[in-house]
Image: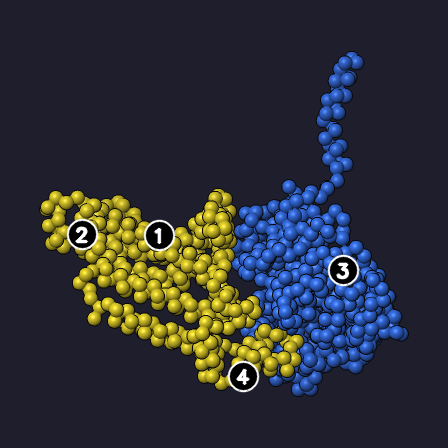
Chain colours: A blue, B yellow
Amino acid sequence: MGKRLLLSLIILMVVTLPLLSSCTETEQASTGGTLRIAITTEPDTLAGNPPSISVMYDLRYMRPVVESLISRDDTGAPKPWLAIDWDYDTEAKTITLDLREGVKFHDGTDFNAEAAKWNLDRYIATGKADVAYMDSVDVLGDYQIRINMKENDSKVIHVLSLYPGLMVSPTAWQNGGSTDEERDTWAEMHPVGTGPFKFVDYERSVKVTLAKFEDYWQEGKPYLDGMEFVVIADQFVASASLMAGEVDILFEPDGKTAKDLEATGDFVVSQTRYPSGSPHLNADTKNPESPYYDVKVRQAVEHAINKQEICDSIGMGYWQPMYQWSVEGSWAYNPDVEGYTFNPERAMELLDEAGYPADPETGIRFETKIMCISISPCPDVSAAIQSYLKDVGIDAEIEVQDPPKYLETQKTEWSYSNALNYGMYGVYPNDFVCHLRNFAPGAHEGRYPNMYVPEEYEVLCAEAIETATDEESMIDVAHRMQEVFNEYAITNWLYAQMTISAKSLKVHDDNIHTNHYDIWTPEDAWIEQ
Amino acid sequence: MGAYIIRRIILSIIVLLLVSLLTFSLLQIMPGDPALIMLGVEATPEELAELRAELWLDRPVVEQYFHWLGNALQGDLGNSITYKESALGIIADALPITMHLALLSLVFGSVLGIGFGIICAIRRGGALDTFITILANTGISIPIFWLGILGIYFFGLQLGWLPIQGYVSPFEDFIKNTRQIIMPVACMMTPSIAVLARQTRSSMLEVINQDYIRTAWSKGLKERVIVLKHALKNALIPVVTLIGLQLRTVVGGTVLIETVFNIPGMGRLMVTSVFNQDFILVQATTLLIAMVVLIGNLIVDISYGWLDPRIRYD
């Protein structure tokens, strides 16, 4: 009996011990390996000369190499990075930043206050809109700087997570040529930053190669030996490469490809929490001759469009309908603003009230035009909108414009008094800043010259820029802005375009496209060996 | 012969000038402002004006063309709008890759095509002749990009025998390069094999029925000697013409194949340039490709004299 009991116990232990160990086992990052990421768009520059960066995907690719003073957390709020603390004094119009110590550039030189000042001075000298209110930078100590503002601008802290806040080595730039122009040109394609990976090589139209930076300021990281961004323009070839194991991640597959990859069970599709783009319909709302002059017509247009259906079909479920200029989860989102949800009956009521009854024979209330760029998915979405508008009696013709023509249309004052322009802006660094960049006084006149923005809204925008420098006041003013914007239906929001990536199950902790378009954690990324 | 070559060279130069004029004109009528495309909507009017002046876009079209032509004759094809580097330098990186693929396709395609054609001719009416003819007709009909996608699916994904995409220099890694180019070259040479097999078969049949061949048979010469030494050379004259035509087909095919297999050659560069509205690169690549085809045709024409001593260039 005793021997039987002992034997049973031994058998029991042999069987259960592995189970116990797997329950208590935590996934530990393994070191080594090269992460290969397929990209469908070649970088314009390699972010080594921040003043010359003009497209977001450059920054996204080069985040492992070039870091910024400030990062963003999961909600989009500013987060310490190379700057560990900051203090915005609205009375003095200054922002004092404390910098992280012990950080090296890839060329071995120190990141310090002088380097930070040099970088900021160069960007301020460009006069670009994001830094228009920054005047100068003072060095207060080895690791402390002060930004002197011409006027208060709450956006500054946020934009320091983007191009203006990128830190590159002044020494490397200086050695990059004999004239400033040569240095700028060299630096554009030879980034020397503080990131977990250093730049090794760029084969035009082929790949960008990065290698582990041994002296990275986060000790013990990165875990990977290197990274490669492999340029594969064709979606089919890129997804085939992912399936064959030639690459580990595919940036921005189209919706169909993403669904197919996910269905195999061998890949996971991640999706940003915040949009990379916010498509919307703008109209000639300043012109009394235009039907869109009447707010009821603008409200009717939005009620007529089934945004959820567009997101589910054309967006393949990777988009979200938008009823205000933020999405749920953003601190700027106002849960009390319902927006103009899909309601064709209400749309027709509003059009009747606005003086556009349906013709008894044709059912048409008025004719209009939808102008859109020829790049997918704009024509498809425009076709869907056309059918929804038709259902409420608005007969819309679609004009698809090639990018050059579309750019010219955006640049010049529209001569179309009866058109809906399908526009979009990139949402960087967050919806709040981006919205102000496009709709604040002085901004919307250039971007949307024919758009009516009520004075009430302009006052709110000015308040947001000048006084909302802390989180509480930013949230308060953002919520009031949402209310007013919605009341006047200044523009018709369509959907939030989330960015997606397809990844091998062997890749972990990269956080690519889990929150933001451009911020991820290359220092934490690892591959199962 | 010398006079003929000089005459052909002069004609080729005229053709090149016409190609450059046509390309330049087509790009001029494209909608949009290149300066606006380069600088984006944020650009100020002053910045746009400055860039237009730098690119000579503010000058009359005729002046723009001759300015560009003058620079081109000195080897300056301008700076790429997309890459901000010398167009000639960019092409210098891409051209060898395309020529590598094109020449391999042409050589293997010609050898195999002629070989199959000979087999079909000497085994006329047999099972082999029928089989090769069916394959040839299929090869002419199939779009090569579709063939490429099929190849990726079967040999890359399903069997895992060959890489899906990419190109590494043969001087850097010969084995990897060989594995990478098997599918692209096979796709590019398929139409050549098909066309040349059919033409060779037809030419061989015509020559084989000549009296001097019958005489050779009656003298007891071996089949191999009759076919290769006596019949083939005369049968090749129309075939050589076709090889010359295949050169432009193969070079044109690189546009599709390099895109499918993600090979950074001239073909893919041209596609990228068109999509990026990089008119400088489009002009440069078109001119270079035209030059390559013209040189290839000249070589083919000169080779007629070697093939048929009766042919004299007066």
What's under tag 2, amino acid-wise? His
Tell me the SS state at disc 4: loop
Q: Mark 1 points at which residue?
A: B108
Q: Quadrant of residue A378?
A: bottom right
| Residue tagged 2 | B230
Do the residues indicated by labels 1 and 2 lie within the same chain of the protein?
yes
Chain of the residue on which disc 2 is drawn: B
Horizontal side of B242 relative to B17 (left or right) equals left
Q: Is residue A454 above or below residue A85?
A: below
Q: Mark 1 lies on which chain?
A: B
Along the line of sight, the residue nearer the viewer: A426 or A279 = A426
Q: What is the CA distance from the residue labelled 4 to the residue labelled 2?
A: 64 Å
Give left or right: position of A217 versus A259: right
Q: Do tag 1 and tag 3 residues touch (Cβ < 8 Å)?
A: no
Circle 3 Cα neighbour tier, 10 Å, few/some/many (<14 / 14–19 / ≥20): many
Type of amino acid under label 3: Phe
Q: What element carries label 1?
A: helix
Task: Give the class, few, some or many, for how many residues have Cα within 10 Å of label 1's Cα (few <14, many ≥20).
Answer: some
Q: Do labels 1 and 3 share a chain?
A: no
Which residue is most to the front?
A178
Viewer-nearest of labels 1 and 3? 3
Residue B58 is labelled as 4
Q: Which chain carries label 3?
A: A
- Neighbours of disc 2 within 10 Å: few (<14), some (14-19), many (20+): some
Q: Which residue is drawn at 62% across and 74% down?
A: B40
Residue sitting at x 23%, y 62%: B305
Mark 3 falls on what kind of element?
Answer: loop
Q: Which residue is at a point 43% across and 69% down the rendered structure image?
A: B286
Mark 1 to mark 3: distance in Å? 58 Å
